[in-house]
Structure formats: structure tokens, C-alpha cells
Image: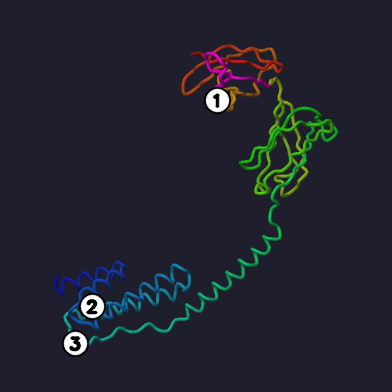
Amino acid sequence: MTSEQTSATLRQLIADNQNKAAAELLYGWFEGKSASRQDAALALLNRIKALDSQVLGGLIAQADADLERNRITKALLELGKQLDETGEADMPEPAPESKAWIYGVIVILLAGMVYLAFDKRGSSTAPPETFNLQVHVHGPGGEADLITAGKIKLLLGTYHSPIQDVNSNGQAVFTEIPGKYLAEPVQLVPMDRYKVTAQSARSAQESRNLTFTLTPIPDTTLIRGMVYLPGPGNRPAAGATLDFNGGQATALTDEKGRFQMAVPLAAGKTAPLMIEYQGKNRYHRDLTVSTGTLFQLTLNP
């Protein structure tokens, strides 16, 4: 590449704001031609890298960065005029002493102080290893309208509590909940024919004593049962999907083939149940719903 071609490429790189590539071009051009000019190109390259690092770390104001970038551009253009020179170089203007590093140190110190302050404050309110939650449930008539029977569970983020019985005082206690779920939103899941319509606090961090208002779901029956694989031995069908009455209720069997689901029909009503297992429809019959029956269902071969 001739000096004219190199000069044209250099100007184009500078016009495209590619100062680093321009400095590298000059460094390579002067290799073996002028050691002092090659040193000057290397110095500019180092200034460019230092500026990029300061900008990336937020250690330099935008106005100062633009000023330094303009100085570097001017120095690149001046050095580019010396492509055919071999004597001592006219050294580019040195970078003025910058106070950016001082600002950077101050910023780092302040950030460290803020971090330590928050760390100390956070350590004083660190969540416990485990915690308990007491739950009260009542009907739409208010606290006097106690719900004194049934089963409930809690969801706190990804945590699913064990199912608890509601006692005669309309209460249930959930113990040894992992502390990391303290601030997670709490959801109550009634296992019977109720839906939650209100709750007294959003999370256990707000209150360890939560009250939930439940409203009965009309014409809903909770059914339970087991699903078995065909053949002898009553082997459980784990992971089978139950679809009741065209999607009105669905359930998935556990590792022991057990299921339970609330279906939107009154006890004694009949509707079709389909069971899918390993991607195939393996059961499709009418089922008469009942809360007192533990259904024993065997898949078709």
C-alpha cells in the first residue's frame, strides 16, 4: 500500500470514528521506517485504550472524553501527514494531565461506603433460617363466619407447603418454611370447594398471621383417585394427564399414580373423563363424580 493509499485509508478511518484502527494503521506503517513515529503511534494507541477504559468504567465526564477524543484525532491527522518522513518525528501533543482518575477513586470509595452501609443494614434484618405462618380462614360473612373443616396448602414463590387440616377454630399452622421465601407473595390453595377472595397481607414478611376470606364454589365436587397401568400388579401410571368434561378440570398424577381435582359439577352428575399417557389417549369414559369415592382407574392397553 502506497503512502497515498495509506493516507486515504487513515482519513476514512478517522471519519468513521475508528481512531483505534487508525492508530494501529500508523503503527504498522512506520515499523522499520521511523522508530520515533512508530513510538508516537503506539502512544496514541495507548491513549485511545485508556480513554475507552475510562468511558466504560464511568470514570470520566462526557465533555472531558469528547475533548480527549478530539485531541487524539488531531494528533492522528498530524502524524498521518508524516507518512513519507524518516527523520525525527514531530511528536503529537501530549495528553494534558487529567483529573479523571481522582474522580474515579472518589466514585469507587463512595460506592464502597454505600455497599458497606447497605450490607450492615441488610445483615441486621437477614431472613431467618425457617419461619412459621399461622393462617385463619373464614367465609364471606366475615370473621364470625368461620370455616372449621377442610384442607389447605400455601404457595410462596416456588415453595409448596404440605397440606394442612383446618381446625375447629378455622386455623392452620404451617411450620419450618425456608427463610428465603419470607418476602415471596403468599397464596392459599383450598383443597375443597372454595376460592380465595381476599387476604390480609401479601407476604410473610408483612405478617406471620394471615387471614384469608374464602367463598364457596357452587356445584363443584372434589374427586380423588388412582390411575393404574394395564396388566397385573396395579402398577401406578405416573405423569398421566386427566381431562374432565373437555377441559373443565385437569389434573396430573404423581409418582404413585394419585390425583385429585375439583370438577365443576355437583356430586352425582356424570361427564366424560379422558386420560392421556405418554402422548396417547388411554382412557375415555363417563364418570359419575362423588366426594366419597376413591376412584380406581385402569388405562387401556
Front residue (pair 144, 45):
45
Q: Position of residue 168 (x, y in %)?
A: 84, 30
Mark in the foreground, 1 or 3: 1
Side of 12 relative to 93 (left or right): left
* Res. 62 image quadrant: bottom left
Q: Which residue is mark 3?
A: 87
Give the secondary structure at mark 2.
Answer: helix
Q: Residues within 10 Å of mark 3 (few under 14, many from 20)?
A: few
Front residue (pair 154, 162):
162
**Dot placed on the residue nearer the N-terminal end, 1 or 2:** 2
Residue occupying image coordinates x 54% and y 26%: 239
Q: Position of residue 11 (x, y in %)?
A: 24, 72
Query: As shown in the figure, which amino acid type bears the numbered disc 1?
Result: Ala
Q: CA distance from mark 2 to mark 3?
A: 14 Å
**Residue 274, disc:** none
Dot 2 and dot 3 residues touching (CB under 8 Å) = no
**Residue 238, disc:** 1
Which residue is at the far right?
A: 144
Q: Which residue is mark 2?
A: 80
Front residue (pair 90, 166):
166
Residue 211 inside the magenta-drawn segment: no
Magenta residues (range): 222-244
Side of 279 relative to 175 (left or right): left
Residue occupying image coordinates x 14% and y 72%: 2
